[in-house]
Image: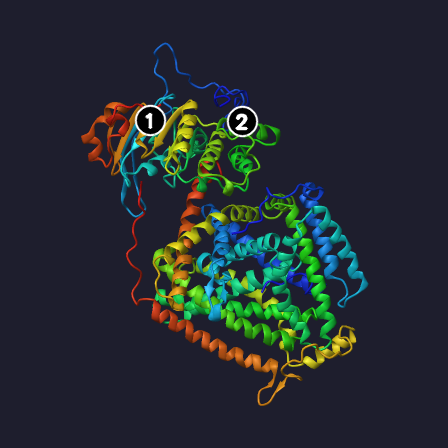
Amino acid sequence: MHLPGTESRRRTLLHRAWPRLKLAAALVIIAGTALLPRRPDALYLVPAAVLAGLWLVCRMPLLYTLRRLLVAQVFILGIAVLALLSPAGRPVFLATLAKSNLCILALLVLTWTTPFPELLQALRRLRLPPVMLTTLALMYRYLPVLAEEARRMERARASRTFSRKRRSGWQNLGAIIGHLFVRTADRAERIYLAMCARGWK
Amino acid sequence: MHLPDGFLDAKTALLSTGAAAAGVGLALRQVRTSLAPRQRPMLGLAAAFVFAAQMLNFPVAGGTSGHLLGGVLTAVLLGPAAAVLVMTCVLIVQCLMFNDGGLLALGANVFNMAIVNACGGYLVFRLLKRLTRLEKNRATVFAAAFAGWCGTVLASLTCAGQLALSHQSNWSVAFPAMALSHMLIGVAEGLATGLITLAVLRARPQLVAGTGGKPGADRLGFLAYGLVISLGLAFFVAPFACPWPDGLEAVARNLGFASKAAPPLIKAPVSEYRLPLIGSATAATALAGVIGTLLAFAAAYMLARLLVPALGARKEDAPAGN
Amino acid sequence: MTGSPKSDPALSGHRPGERPGQEKRAEPSLKGEETVPALRIGALSYCYPQGRLALEGVSFSVTPTECIAVLGPNGAGKSTLLLHLNGLLPDHPPRQPSIWVEGQPLLAGTLELVRQRVGLLFQDPDDQLISATVFEDVAFGPRQWGIAGPDLQALVARCLGLVGLPGFEEREPHRLSQGEKRRVCLAGVLACRPSVLVLDEPTSDLDPRGRREFKALLRSLPGAKVIATQDLELVVDLCSRVLILDQGRLVAEGPTLPLLSNEELMLAHGLERPHSLLHHHPHR
């Protein structure tokens, strides 16, 4: 499973900037871009230029950028095509395509330059409710653990599955995910005990 | 159904963020008062679980595969308040780490997927469980499966409404497209929800919420979530479902939103959106919705009848000590 | 290893639960007076919620410097016993204490104190390593007790140094090896400055080198240690005394070598004589 790692990133100026600043900047850029007029316009060049500059500074590999943008096109096109079917659709379609991609680029720069734990710190300083912060932190920590458990269970099932019927495939997956939930609940209980053991109240 | 940035206009984004904030605030309050500290770590683990579950591929016809969304499943297993928080965190991470869903659109996505999908589905789940005469486990699986379908379709409605309100697309295009496609997607979601609920019931029945709980507190929660969802439907769906679409067009023209009619790039299959016999595409979709609901209902019922044995689960083992 | 926890200046000073000036505790006396045991368990019994008896009348004590092992077949109640030592079980603190930590009875009012004095290392390091970075995790305990800022950073650095992982602060847990995760967990427990270390199967999933390194680490840490384990070679190397638990009852207690050499006793309780004693090769 590909969790955007941190050690392989190059340390640039943007990497060292304050996470809160980066989050706020991303919001401003995205808000500004999203609120641009609904047809292709010269104004679009403003966020495009800003983002191009940031992209160059943060040294995101071109292939990585293109790959992520390509994956995003699936979702963007899927919804944007609805605009095509409406009257006066074409300008809206093109505008949306451009705006969406610019916003995705902004998010890409943010996530490239800011590892998730730093984003969590920024959210903590922005006074996100503690329950949500704990949930986000635990989620980030245990996602690879659970993903590995799920993969192991899938492999174990696959090694004992001989029929290729779709129904048994679905039932198997249902059983795997169900058991994953039970194991997750047990693990959560042990984690609670471990947290209490170190003084958590 | 994750909306990227650039689709919603300012007013829709603000409206949906406000509605989302209301729902999440409600959930936070409920969690703070009624969730024991022992259950707190489970929120984070459940969020990781939803993510991990989404990574497993369910084979769908023709070599494609789909994956679980998990909103209704989480609500069936953990209750609505926890589900709202868990799904919100999942959406935040999906946005910030995987660029799945926009940052500004987070409010709309949270409203659609964490509140309408999870809570709406949960309300359907509880209602159905109360009304059905099936035996307990069967009722749970039946209700979970149907609620999974409903939640998906409901969320697609508010999503379509948000797109239409932003003038990203006409309601008469967005509604059929979103509703019909999600009626199909919902089948997979409902099936998966039912199967997973069944597996959990078999292994550890006490882990399924909605089997018990204080009726008094429940009722208040129901009302509150029902209210938030109704408001959302009022904002995003009602303006379009009302029988005066022409009036809305007139308003739009007066406010200068509608542009000069340029011919659409792709000729819609129904050029003037009227079908013989059935009428407008919107009406056709509504009819399809009714039929789809009945079909999903029947399918969920059959699933429960076929897969769940009439008498309860096997004897559970006591936990092994060490 | 740079220093031991007790002599380390960065770790001295008043501990959580104490007011400044309360640092002096009972030291082992040279005049032959009775020393307060680090742990004393008196007739501890526990039933699972389902009604099954998990522990029955378990009694023993641990002096401030000894390392004892808790052995027994699976299902004997070892983990359950360990959870009691930290006050995690039973769910509601008892009215009559069965456990005394450095002379203090374990009751509702002393729970916080006991939790700090008894450091528990869980079997699966993934259950204990809960934070996004190593620093956050080691800092988790001290943060609960109010330590912050540069003091916290120094404490974390010291503890990571003690377990042989200096500079690991910014590493992410899911990228560490099993042995490294265990050591980070130990650092996190040491950061709470416990008097007694309780370890549940500490070498269960380590490779031979990891096992040797962890053994050396444990040997370097002073203070009382209670180790529940199936690793009999570890017991021979580190522990001076052994307790054997079977079906919730303490069936044997005594010095390591004579007890472990008693083949009949070991086999009767689901264990066996360790190979190092069979072949007279003491592993060091």
Given residues C219 and C61, the one toward you in this image is C219
Given residues C39 and C103, the one toward you in this image is C39
Query: Which residue position is annotated with label 2?
Result: C158
Residue C68 - label: 1
Q: Earlier in the sequence, mark 1 or mark 2?
A: 1
User: Compared to B245, does C161 lie above or below?
Assistant: above
User: Going by the picture, which residue comes out furthest to the front?
Assistant: A63
Residue at image coords 71%, 80%? B247
User: Compared to C61, does A35 lie above or below?
Assistant: below
Name the element at disc 1.
strand
Q: Cβ–Cβ below 8 Å for labels 1 and 2?
A: no
Residue B253 placement (x, y as % from top left): 77, 77
The quadrant holding residue A93 is bottom right
The quadrant holding residue C58 is top left
User: Compared to C104, does A65 lie above or below?
Assistant: below
Residue C5 placement (x, y as % from top left): 48, 23
Residue B47 - label: none
Name the element at disc 2.
helix
Residue C268 is at least partly visible in this image: yes
Residue B191 placement (x, y as % from top left): 44, 67
Residue at image coords 55%, 35%? C135
Is the N terminus of chain B in the top left, top right, bottom left or bottom right quadrant? bottom right
User: Going by the picture, which residue comes out furthest to the right?
Assistant: A42
Residue C118 placement (x, y as % from top left): 42, 30
Of all chains, the one bearing label 1 is C
Mark 1 and mark 2: span between their CA atoms? 26 Å
Inspect the image, locate mark 2, and give the three-letter code of the amino acid beneath it.
Answer: Arg
User: Compared to A122, does A69 lie above or below?
Assistant: below
Q: How many labels does the image show?
A: 2
Inspect the image, locate mark 1, and give the three-letter code of the amino acid beneath it.
Answer: Ile
